[in-house]
Amino acid sequence: MTVQQLLQNDVLPLQMEDAIHFALGLMDELKVRELPVNSGDIFRGLLREDRLEQIADESLSLQAAQLNPEPLFIGQDRSLHHALRIMHSGELSLLPVLDENGLYCGYLSAEHLFHELGGLLSADVSGGVLVLEMAAEDYQLSEIAQLMETNDLKILNVTVRPVEMSTRIEVMLKTQSRDLSRALQTLARYEYKVQLAEFEDVHDLQLNERYELLMKMLEI
């Protein structure tokens, strides 16, 4: 999946001539902590809310306050993984997207990416979840997949993350079946360490969401 497939373009960049109070008001209205900035059609970078709040005179323009936007952006032909890496490392709620000519053409929002990731991780599909822990050098997806297939389990998604302060990793498997009993026995025979085994039922999740919504309504 590329950035262009998730592009949003309902937010126009700030201009360097805009006043600081205007920029802060727009951030508050859009519920974001950053906004892209242009000089005319030329992309200047990304400006953060906390930098604007440091200026005492909010009537000043961005240019008059000598605010230099950060060169944070991504090309529309880049991958979703690359975008996530930039947003995670920069702690961004919004990431500007540039076209092949280096011009601003839209943005990615953290909220939108969150919903897209749910689909990519098959979070909206009923099934089982297994979390395995192992040494990084012992990780062989082909072997794990074969063990799952011998128990008639189809892997829908695999995510791998390092265990903090160690050389070990956690491997999360999302399967199409909620019956994990046979797979757990097989994993035990092959001496895999299972950190978590649970089933997910989308219907149950929906009922829980409706219950929480009802409770909030009753509190009003």
Image (cartoon, helix red, strand yellow):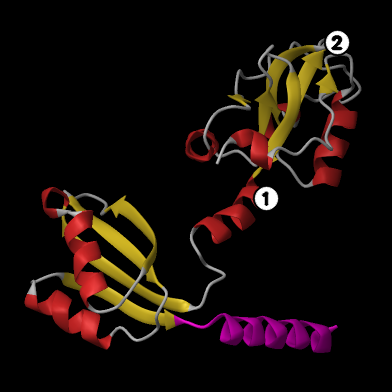
Compared with 57, 205 (above or below) is below
Three-letter code, disc 1: His
Residue shown at 67%/27% (left/top)?
97
Residue underneath mark 1 = 112
Camera sees residue 6: yes
Three-letter code, disc 2: Gly
Q: Where is residue 98, by image quadrant?
A: top right
| Residue 83: % across, % down | 54, 35
Tell me the element at label 1: helix
| Residue 110 appears left or right of 177 | right
| Residue 69: % across, % down | 68, 18
Residue shown at 52%/34% (left/top)?
79
Q: Residues within 10 Å of mark 2 (few under 14, many from 20)?
A: few
Residue underneath mark 2 = 40
Q: Quadrant of the C terminus?
A: bottom right
Compared with 99, 161 (above or below) is below
Of residues 86 and 156, the one drawn nearer to the viewer in this rendering = 156
Of residues 100 and 30, the one drawn nearer to the viewer in this rendering = 100
Q: Where is residue 53, by image quadrant?
A: top right
Q: Is residue 203 magenta?
A: yes
Residue segment shown in magenta: 200-220
| Residue 88 appears left or right of 39 | left
Q: Residues within 10 Å of mark 1 (few under 14, many from 20)?
A: some
| Residue 130: % across, % down | 31, 72
Q: Is residue 45 magenta?
A: no
Compared with 164, 132 (above or below) is below
Helix, strand or loop: magenta stretch: helix
CB of mark 2 within 8 Å of CB of mark 1? Answer: no
| Residue 47: % across, % down | 70, 25
Residue shown at 35%/70% (left/top)?
154
Q: Quadrant of the N terminus?
A: top right
